Amino acid sequence: MTERVNRHRGRVDLGKSTPEGTPDTPVPAGTPGTAPGAVPAVDPRLLVRERGLAGYAGEFTRRLSAGELGSLPVVLGLVAIAAVFQGLNENFLSAQNLSNIAVAMTGTGMMAIGIIFVLLIGEIDLSVGAVSGVSGAIVAVLSVTHGVDEWLAVLAAVAGGALIGSLHGVVFAVIGAPAFAVTLAGLLFWQGFMLQILGSSGTVNLDPDGVVGRLNTYYFTDVAAAHGLAAVAVAVFLLTGVLDIRRRAAAGVPARPLADLLLRTGALAAVGFAAAFVLNQYKGLPLALVLFLAALLGTDLLLRRTVYGRWVLALGGSVEAARRAGVPVALVRISVFAVAGTFAAIGGLFMASKIAAANQGAGGGELLMNVIAAAVIGGTSLFGGRGRTWHALLGVMVIVSIQYGLALEGIKSPVQFMITGGVLLATVVIDSVTRRTQRTAGRA
């Protein structure tokens, strides 16, 4: 029986001929295990791209009807936030305010990257705020009180965060205690640990010109820096896309059309160079933003291009299915908590840099809620299995933009908390409705 592919439906039909007028893609000669004239299963996304704008319009409609909203609500939310606050205060979209937002979001954003790894397996880590406070305290006590080289103190703080996260992961994955309870206990313990090592004074000031002190204050003032970063990002994106097209063509499988790649590259160039222009109108390219973008890119590649990333996503889909597929479940669970602890420590360094000190209030207040809210608002599902680290960028942009917009209007913190809570609730409701719609459409 000849096996053929219905390309318009993107599935394999046995014993049925391809509808008249539907082009077949023959299997490359010499492909093992295939009959002569057989055609391969084709990724439906590639068929959409081949149809051009009409294909994208149809795919967009299908995704909306199936509840696959992606990052669309967040992007529309950011546009609405910018429009509303710019209407209320003309300084909201000024170069200075946008640059301040870019720097302010890095600490929370770094921590959100780590929490996304935990959310992807369907768990939660309540200790990241306290771990960030411990990180700042370790750096301050080692470098200022004990005279340790600041670079070594930074490495010790980051390693301490990874160790703390690994400890939480072991208790959860090996002993079997609920992650919620383990990290809640960690929140209390590490908060007390931070207070203990800070001592009776409760505050240790950092050198504003030191390694940590300059994380939030250093800018690349040369205009070529921001534009150069944008140019490198666009060039790498284009080169990677071209190489992927050639690799697929050499393997005899469908690839993204070149026009599609050029369109995406143009959109990235427009955003990148516009951002560079705005940043250069104030102080230049912030070091904090560069480090944040580098972390986003690295972790995104880790999740999308490595076996480990597939393990994490598989575990979020179904633990039992992942186990039967050979995924080392316990090891992956431990590792995601280690990642969360590491990025909590890195975020803590940015928080300490913001005030050039480590104090008893570090890691407390609304920080934990903002970190979780940033991940969820950005598009990461609380139910596991769906999310990207770039969601940390989108989510933290929403939160910090709201905070800065309200601050420009002189609105105090209580209202900021209520609005952020409302946005988070709306996001969770959208996530729940989306999953229900996908389940109804047979895509969950």
Image (tube, grey):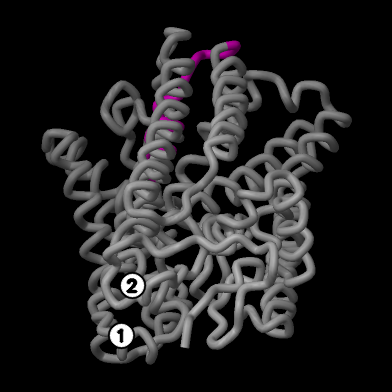
| Whether residue 366 is visible | no
Task: Report the front residue among 252 and 78.
Answer: 252
Disc 2 marks a residue whose amino acid type is Trp
Q: Describe the element under mark 1 as helix, strand or loop.
A: loop
The residue depicted at 26 percent of the width and 72 percent of the height is: 32
Disc 1 marks a residue whose amino acid type is Ala
Span of residues in magenta: 281-295
Question: Is 331 left or right of 400, judged from the image as shown?
Answer: left
Cα separation between marks 2 and 1: 10 Å
Query: Is 197 rendered above or below residue 257?
Result: below
Query: Is 368 rendered above or below residue 146?
Result: below
Question: Is 425 left or right of 340, judged from the image as shown?
Answer: right
Query: Is 45 rendered above or below residue 103?
Result: below
The residue depicted at 21 percent of the width and 64 percent of the height is: 163
Question: Dot 1: few (<14), some (14–19), or many (≥20) neighbours within 10 Å?
Answer: few
Q: Which residue is mark 1?
A: 325
Task: Report the front residue among 178 and 273.
Answer: 273
The residue depicted at 31 percent of the width and 40 percent of the height is: 204
Numbered label attached to residue 311: 2
Residue 270 sits inside the magenta stretch: no
Q: Position of residue 166 (x, y in %)?
A: 24, 70
Contact, mark 2 vs mark 1 (Cβ under 8 Å): no
